[in-house]
Image: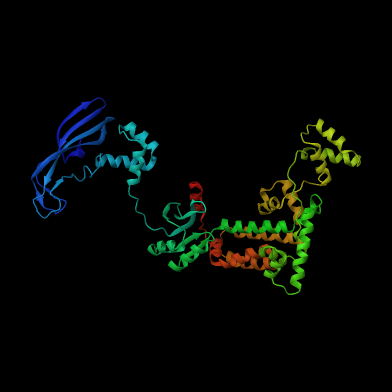
Amino acid sequence: MFSGLSALVIDGVDEDAGSLAVRASTPPGPVVCPGCAAQTGRVHGYFHRQIADMPVGGRRVLIRLRARRMRCPSLECPRQTFREQLAGVIERYQRRTVRLTRQVGGVVRELAGRAGSRVLAGFGVALSRQTALRALLKLPLPASATPRVIGVDDFALRKRQRYATVIVNAENGERVDVLADRRAETLETWLREHTDVEVVCRDGSGAYAEAIRRALPDAVQVGDRWHIWHNLAEAVIKEVAAHSSCWGKTGPPPREGIQAQTTRERWQQVHDLLDVGVGLLECARRLNLALNTVKRYARIGEPERLVRAPKYRPTLVDPYREHLRRRREVDPAVPVQHLFAEIKQLGYLGSLNLLYRYITQGRVESDRPAISPRRLARYLLTRPDRLKDHQRERLDAAVAACPEMTALAGLVGDFAALLAPTAGNDMRLTGWIDQARAEDLPHLHAFTRGLELDRHAVNAALTYSFHNGRTEGINTRRR
């Protein structure tokens, strides 16, 4: 029952209500001074300690220990007196025996605070959740070998204020380490101490890429396929918006407003200055425009590509569009008040003003409701077998509206096929980039330039099966 207390002298056992009190003392004999390592048997005095031990039969066990304070025989020792310690039974400054501490650590390692406290109470160990957490924090971290493949990503400790870096075993998802910041020097120092790393998965961070190149020049850097696809999606959204004047004709007819007129005037002003040799920065100063705005106008060859299709939100009139269309086909001059009264009887809850705007915008005669550039881009980026019939019809009509949209749809499908890691995808990517640059798609050209800046990591992402998804998953769970 008390085999773990063999180093003590058991003087007796008292049974209280729900607990056992073990009276014990330290064995006689000399002990070693912790200050000078000299042996001494001179007793200066005695002290008492009460220590919790492993429960017996679901009942708490308390050890009431009588220990000695010894006097050191060496006059040069900084310790004139000291308390004798029982290594392996009771640690210094602890209120629990070593074996009970070991059991508590095993439980809280799996269950942490509240749950660990409840489970230990069922075994007869009284422990608060705060004490359970402190016991968990005292446990040493398990020693583990440096993984061959790691994932690196940053996360916010305080958004826009303080960031850290998490390093994960990319093969099994285990966290390896957390660095105090996301600077390249910090990651470089860690990598120089772990030279067994062969593959590093990361996002498009230039700081991480430079740290890996300096610390482990022979390591393979693998870009994150999700971020590559996300960057392509952003470029596709901009291209779809740039050609909204073409595919927008397949929905409601575009209406010329003040914004469209201003866009055409600015485009003409920018190109008039460029034709006489004025630089981009000087154009921005003369026209009082942002430099990026001037660059955007300069890239476009005709102002119609800058005019956006109208963006209509779903309204309360949409369910009654077919009824309105039939009535206006029979009687094009039917008053709006009559239509308002008819759909009110059918359950319309909106106002007359909303119905009037709906009709004047041309949404009744449209073959299909208007669609935003972002939604159309989402259709374009979705696998064709996952689109519904009406979505596929809407996408086919928009893609066929202009040659640029047709080329964009083909390029998106070809790049999606490259995201399945296969040997030779790096050569296929070169062909894809050449094909994309041959089309009049400036936003896609910017995407290809980004690929070239990090080409080695992109090639590895398209040919190796490694990815940074487990690192991103840990950051997502953490939020």
Percent across and percent down for residue 184 are 46, 63
Residue 216 seen: no
- Using residue 400 as the reference point, say whether residue 144 is left or right of it: left
Q: Residue at x 72, y 48 (%)?
A: 391
Percent across and percent down for residue 467 are 51, 57
- Using residue 301 as the reference point, say whether residue 420 is left or right of it: left
Q: The N terminus appears in which quarter of the rendering?
A: top left
Percent across and percent down for residue 466 are 50, 58
Q: Residue at x 39, y 36 (%)?
A: 115
Q: Kindly indicate the quadrant of the structure image that contains residue 314.
A: top right
Percent across and percent down for residue 92 are 23, 45
- Name, please, the residue furthest toward the bottom: 277
- Using residue 255 as the reference point, say whether residue 169 is left or right of it: left
The one of 264 and 215 positioned closer to us in this rendering = 264
- Using residue 343 as the reference point, say whether residue 85 is left or right of it: left
What colour scheme was applied to this rendering of the protein?
A: rainbow
Residue 40 seen: yes
- Name, please, the residue furthest toward the top: 17
Q: Residue at x 54, y 58 (%)?
A: 224
> With respect to residue 474, does 243 lie above or below?
below
Callout count: 0
